[in-house]
């Protein structure tokens, strides 16, 4: 993890040295990193603006999520105790006529981690509920679900691997002043992960509307709303729901010419049929952090998220992201050489 952070910082400094144009505003990628939700996510929190024809952009993000909850209701029981590290490479390319194509390639690791002590101390300092953490061994890994006395999912060993690759696309159907835009976006999930390792293995299709106001004074607002159709495969495939609606809204506050604060709230219907809050309740996540723009369309983001609907998402997620979206400069039209005049 430390090596990855150094690589991101070095990359940001490198692009800053050679490229001259500041990056545009955009939401944080966000998402619910619960081990049971990873195989059902619709994709990154993409904005209403799309790439221009021939324009390309990428981002590399590392997130560390710490989760702890133990719950039982009726004939069900769940344990979510561990840490998840997700590193995701996102690519976007403008096709022209308001169209964009892209891909998200994740690498996911699960382990006992090492943040349990820090989180317990943080809860004690602020007088927050600990959810039973002190009564359980620290830095332990167990993701499990039982129903009718049968264990339907379990991971208690360190695992890592390629997650489900996502193919993404967008069509901008409206563009206004000051960068305001609206687009239809979608994602297609490919089952490249493994359900047994909690890295994915499920298919799915998601469609949503995304819009943003453009910069208005010192702020820019963005929102999206859509629907996911989780397909077959993945963790707990036998109790998955066929449809889940989701929505999110956020704001970027410009503090300095190159520094801004971003805050966004994300909500989703559950992905599973379950009486347990962890699996069967509407989820809510609050994401917040800072973004620094370098020259050349590069941006470095650091922040965290937490479950504002308790137990529906990880207790805390820390993330670091480097993105690069160079400003688009269309080539001047080439004029045909003048014809020689015959005398």
Image: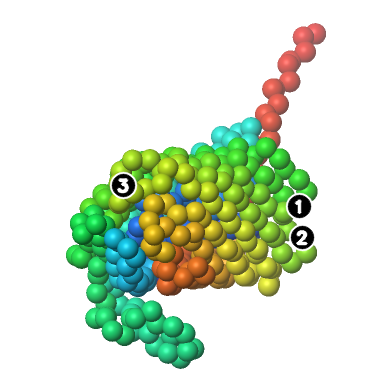
Residue 254 visible somewhere in the drawing:
yes
- Tell me the quarter of the image containing the C terminus: top right
User: Residue 298 appears at what percent x and percent y?
Assistant: 55, 59
Q: Which residue is mark 2?
A: 216
Work out whether 135 lies above or below 292. Answer: below
| Mark with earlier residue (2, 3) | 2
- Asked if labels 1 and 3 touch by Cβ distance under 8 angstroms, the answer is no
| Displayed quadrant of residue 8 | bottom left
The residues bearing labels 2 and 3 have C-alpha atoms spaced at a distance of: 45 Å
**Residue 93 appearing in the image:** no
Residue furthest top in the image: 343
Is mark 1 in CB contact (under 8 Å) with mark 2? Answer: yes
Q: Is residue 11 left or right of residue 198?
A: right
Choose the circle earlier in sequence order: 1 or 2.
Answer: 1
Name the residue tied to disc 1: 178
Q: Earlier in the sequence, mark 3 or mark 1?
A: 1
Marks 3 and 1, how far apart in space? 45 Å
Along the line of sight, the residue nearer the viewer: 123 or 14? 123
């Amino acid at each position: 993890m430390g090596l990855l952070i150094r690589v991101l910082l070095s990359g940001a400094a490198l692009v800053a040295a050679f490229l001259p144009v500041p990056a545009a505003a955009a939401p944080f990628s966000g998402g619910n990193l619960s081990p049971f939700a990873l195989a059902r996510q619709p994709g990154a929190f993409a904005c209403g603006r799309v790439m221009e024809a021939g324009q390309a952009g990428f981002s590399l993000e590392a997130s560390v999520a710490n989760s702890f909850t133990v719950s039982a209701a009726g004939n069900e029981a769940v344990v979510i105790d561990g840490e998840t590290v997700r590193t995701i490479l996102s690519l976007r390319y403008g096709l022209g006529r308001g169209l964009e194509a892209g891909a998200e390639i994740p690498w996911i690791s699960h382990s006992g981690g090492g943040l349990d002590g820090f989180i317990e101390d943080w809860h004690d300092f602020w007088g927050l509920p600990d959810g039973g953490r002190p009564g359980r061994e620290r830095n332990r890994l167990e993701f499990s679900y039982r129903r009718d006395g049968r264990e339907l999912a379990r991971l208690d060993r360190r695992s890592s691997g390629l997650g489900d690759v996502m193919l993404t696309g967008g069509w901008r159907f409206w563009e206004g002043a000051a960068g305001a835009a609206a687009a239809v976006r979608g994602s297609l999930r490919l089952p490249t992960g493994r359900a047994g390792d909690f890295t994915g293995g499920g298919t799915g299709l998601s469609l949503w509307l995304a819009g943003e106001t453009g910069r208005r004074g010192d702020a820019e607002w963005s929102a999206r709303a859509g629907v996911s159709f989780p397909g077959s495969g993945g963790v707990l495939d036998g109790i998955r729901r066929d449809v889940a609606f989701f929505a999110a809204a956020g704001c970027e506050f410009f503090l300095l010419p190159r520094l801004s604060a971003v805050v966004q709230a994300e909500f989703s219907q559950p992905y599973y049929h379950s009486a347990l809050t962890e699996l069967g309740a509407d989820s809510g996540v609050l994401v917040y952090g800072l973004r620094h723009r370098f020259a050349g369309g590069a941006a470095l983001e650091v922040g965290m998220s937490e479950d504002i609907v308790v137990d529906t998402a990880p207790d805390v997620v820390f993330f670091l992201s480097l993105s690069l979206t160079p400003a688009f400069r269309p080539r001047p039209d080439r004029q045909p050489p003048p014809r020689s005049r015959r005398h």
